[in-house]
Image (spheres, rainbow, N blue to C red):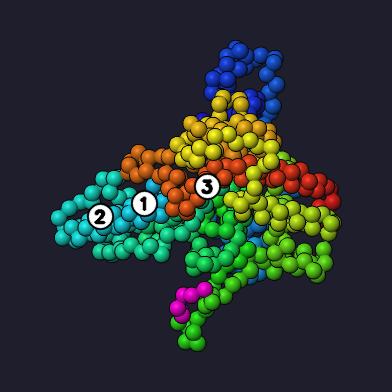
Amino acid sequence: MNKLQTAKADIFYYDIGDYLSREEKLSIIRNFRSVNNPAIQWKQLTPNEQGDWINQRNDLFSSFIPLAPEKKFDNHAQSLFSTYAIGVATNRDAWVYNYSNEKLNKNMRAMISFYNKQADLFQKQEIELDNDPSKISWTVNLKKDIEKNIKHTFDKNYIINSIYRPYCKQNLYFDYNFIERPGIHAKLFPTSDTKNLLICVHGLGGSKPFSTLITDCIPDLNSLEAGSQCFPLYWYEKKTSIQGELIEQTADEYIRRDGLSDFILSRAQAQYGKNIGKEDIFYFVYGFLHSPDYRVKFANDLKKMLPRLPLVDSPEDFWRFSKAGRALAKLHLHYETVPPCPEVKVTGAESKQYKVEKMKFPAKDRKDTIIYNSTITIENIPEKAYLYVVNGKSAIEWIMERYAVTTHNESGIKNDPNDWAKEHDKPRYILDLLLSVINVSVQTVDIVAGLPKVEWEKIID
């Protein structure tokens, strides 16, 4: 019997370049004409232990301390945090998100009413489910509720603020019955007035450069690429009575637990002194995750793994990262209140025509000016403001993209950011938001530029 033999193959790779269009890539290939063209600098590939052929990980990264524990809520975790959560996945964004509280209320009342009528008819075996997308968005869990003859009611108290995309707040109807994957956010924000902070990072397998964003409210899963992963300053546990029964859910009847582990506190205090607290470490993490040295050196690792961080060599550098993290957090949490850059010029605002349809640049390669609407223009925007990039684009361009009037194709639901301005009695809200985020971007770039350079050879793992 002849045995099949597999010949060993050599694999070669040529990096055609980043940020090219499809046409540009094809043009380069056509110009080479042949794989034997000497102009092609082929690189032979050999996979590493993790099976990476290209964009290989750095071995040093694996020696750092992981942000995420192997098991959530593990008090003995050998990681920076004792737990973490993914962002909220609703699977019906058009219905449960809206800039308008009033329209969200109306949309959800209508869908819940339709659902309950469908439930009645389904139990009588008179129908199959109506899949009209203008009336409801079915998901697996909602269909299971139909089968169990579970009815739902609308409750306005479920409407909360949420971060939908970077620097974009919307109202969210946070009822678990209509949120397909709520995660563990009941432990992070158990009541409407619970205070907490989350450091959010990219999920695994994305293509965009690494970025991070802090928030004080529930984030959407897609607020960062590949599913935002959120690391809390605190998490909350329900108190129980003597008999072990759960007691009434009010803010003072939850026990606040630290999101940072005892392990990392012990390590940090041993290295930097007993005056270090968990909050200092929390802001150290946020500052360090902005380090250009870190992001460049471990770019491949950060696309394939959740972040791991070292403890820097000196107490001085620890405090510089921690203080920078606090300053960045203040900017990124309170971005709506940051005053505009003095040099930025606004024309046409005296018209008081603040409504927006869709902002745009006067030309693709001219970003010093933004046409806000037919009356108002923002000019003299500093070039470096666009260097602050989060989730693949500048914070400024997130405002331009998300604060536009849209209509969902399937449901026909309109989402108008001007409604947020109207309902909050702030007619200039969107204009002022854009001006604030321009300054947030400039200040972020300046703070990041002042971060300590990391001497990797001195890192203590």
Residue 408 marker: none
x and y percent of residue 206 in the render? 57, 42
In the picture of the structure, the residue carrying the numbered disc 2 is: 114
Indicate the secondary structure of the residue bearing disc 2: helix
Magenta residues (range): 246-251
Q: Say what secondary structure mark 3 lies in.
A: helix
| Mark 3 to mark 2 CA distance (whole Å) | 35 Å
Task: Please indicate, yes or no, whether residue 67 appears anywhere in the rendered image.
Answer: yes
**Residue 165 % position (x, y):** 52, 47
Q: Disc 2 to disc 1, how far (Cα)?
A: 16 Å
Give the Cα separation between the discs numbered 1 and 3: 19 Å
Mark nearer the N terminus (1 vs 3): 1
Mark 1 neighbour class, 10 Å CA radius: few under 14, some 14 to 19, many 20 or more: some
Q: State which quadrant residue 274 falls in.
A: bottom right
**Residue bearing mark 1:** 103
Q: Nearer the viewer, residue 366 or 378?
A: 378
Q: Nearer the viewer, mark 2 or mark 1?
A: 1
148 is within the stretch colored magenta: no
The dominant secondary structure in magenta is loop
